[in-house]
Amino acid sequence: MQDDPRTHLAAAARDFYARGWMLGTAGNLSARSDTDTFWITASGRPKDRLAAGDFVLVDRQGQVVQAPPGRQPSAEAAIHETIYRHVPDARVIFHVHSIEANLCGHFARQGRLRLPPLEMLKGLGVPDAEPQVDLPVFANHLNVARIAEDMDREFTGALPRVPGALIHLHGVTAWGPDFLAARHHLELLEYCFRYLVQAKILAIGV
C-alpha cells in the first residue's frame, strides 16, 4: 500500500453503502499502516461521505496515534486488533451490516454457521469439492471488548477455515492481504448468506 489507505477505505465504504451494507453510520473498515498501527473509521461517521479526516490511526494496544480533532476510533477497534494479531497476513478488514448476514445468524448452531458447499468457496481458500465449512458466530455483547475477547479465545484455539466471522444480529467481518482480496472475501461470504436465506425460503436442505 504505497498510497494513502484512507482513500481506498473511503471508496470501499461508498461501495458498501450503495449495496445497503453500511447504512447510516453502521459498520467499520480498517487497513494496516505498518506492523504496529492501523487506520480505522472514526466512530459515528456516515459511510457514504468519508474523507481522510474520518479515520483514526491506532496502535496494536488500541491507543490513538493520530486523530483529527473530535474524532474517536470505532468502538470495534478491539475486534480489528484481535484479527490483525492472530492473522499476520490480514492487512485489510471490512465489517458490514447486511440483512442476509443478520438473518443467517439465526441458522447457526453452537456458535457455527455451516456454509453452503458451493463452488464459490474456492475464492475463500477452500478448494475441496462440496466441502463442509463452518463460519464462527460470536454473541453480540453490548460491551464490544467482550466480543473481541471471545474472538481471541476462539482464534487462539484455531483460526477459521475461511477469512471471516459473523457476529449474531450484528454483522459480518471479512479480511484479506489487500483491498481487493478483502472485498472479494466479503462478497463471497455475502453470496453464501444470500444463498442460505433463499434456500430456507425454498425449503432446500443445505
Image: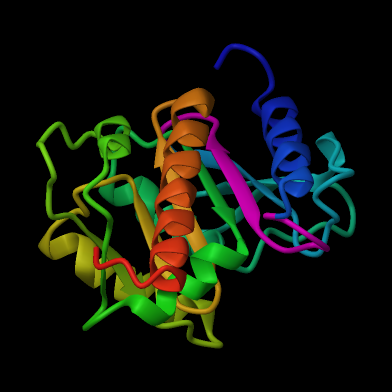
Residue under the image location 80 percent in, 50 percent down: 47
Count of numbered tags? 0
Q: Main secondary structure of the magenta part?
A: loop
Residue under the image location 27 percent in, 50 percent down: 86
Residue 162 image offset from top left, x and y in percent: 26, 46
Which range of residues does the magenta coloring cover? 21-35
Residue nearest the observer in this picture, 96 or 141: 96
Residue 179 placement, left or right of 48: left
In magenta stretch: residue 27: yes
Residue 151 placement, left or right of 10: left
In magenta stretch: residue 100: no
Residue 54 visible in image: yes
Residue under the image location 25 percent in, 32 percent down: 122
Residue nearest the observer in this picture, 68 or 51: 51
Q: How is the image coloured?
A: rainbow
Whether 55 is drawn above or below 133: the answer is above
Residue farthest to the top? Answer: 2
Residue 206 image offset from top left, x and y in percent: 24, 63
Q: Quadrant of the N terminus?
A: top right
Residue 12 placement, left or right of 32: right
Residue under the image location 76 percent in, 48 percent down: 17
Residue 3 image offset from top left, x and y in percent: 66, 14
Residue farthest to the bottom? Answer: 142
Whether 101 is drawn above or below 2: the answer is below
